[in-house]
Amino acid sequence: DLGSICTTVPKAMHNSLWGTSHISYSACAAQVFLFVFFISAEYFLLTIMCYDRYVSICKPLHYGTLLGSRACAHMAAAAWASAFFYALMHTANTFSLPLCQGNGLGQFFCEIPHILKLSCSQSNLRELVLIVLSAFLYFGCFVFMVFSYVQIFRAVLRIPSEQGRHKAFSTCLPHLAVLSLFLSTGFFAYLKPPSISSPSLDLALSVLYSVVPPALNPLIY
């Protein structure tokens, strides 16, 4: 959360305070890489945390076996490594395209969709492959999280005591709140109908999904 905010907000504040709107090419590439890296890592870690909730509620007697310190370290390492290579692929693909449509992004940070609008390349095969890969990856995690929470709610509703149900729900509520905020803002920003798109709306949505969830997550937890 701190990493994703520090990637975009300080430069935007600097430009606002000094009345400028510039960022160097290398700084823009670094911003794209770091932002995608931190956002992807958060999504993968939220998926792992969903598995943690599932095991703790649905298979409590196997928790020590399935989620020991070694398993947690391996899953965390896999999340960070996957986010690193995912961000590297997106950054390399985006900045390997020739840009000929000017250099104004109309955004408060370097965002891939806005950079691609400046491209004059007719070959979008690599970007299409990355989009398909991203869709499978993110949708796969999303299906896993939905399936896990369906199983969690079924298990919680079978708990006979009200105190037990409340304890189980309280374990999931912070994670569910963070997940809902993260997914709803991100999905709406990237999957909104083109008919309602406008520069001011795009800017507002970018702030909503890139700044608001990381700022609120520590308070929610």
Image: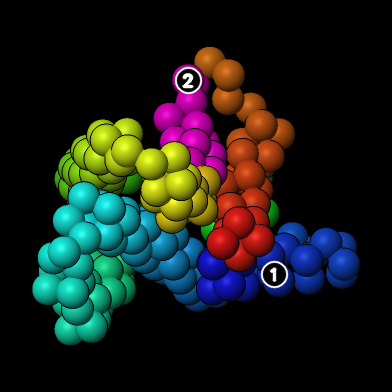
Q: Which residues are magenta?
A: 179-194
Q: Is residue 6 above or below residue 123?
A: below
Determine the residue located farthest toward the front in the rendered image.
Answer: 161
Q: Which residue is mark 1?
A: 11
Q: Is residue 132 above or below residue 19?
A: above
Can I make out residue 159 in this image? yes
Quarter of the picture containing the C terminus is bottom right
* Image spot of residue 85 (x, y percent): 24, 69
Residue plotted at (48% across, 26% down): 192
Q: Is residue 187 magenta?
A: yes
Q: Is residue 18 left or right of residue 1?
A: right
Q: Few, some or many C-alpha atoms within 10 Å of disc 1 (few <14, some 14-19, many ≥20)?
A: some
Residue plotted at (23% across, 83% down): 69
Q: Is residue 211 magenta?
A: no
Q: Is residue 153 above or below residue 93?
A: above
* Image spot of residue 160 (x, y percent): 32, 38
* Figure label count: 2
* Image spot of residue 115 (x, y percent): 48, 50
- Which amino acid type is shown beneath numbered disc 2? Pro
Q: Which residue is mark 2?
A: 193
Mark 2 lies on a secondary structure that is loop
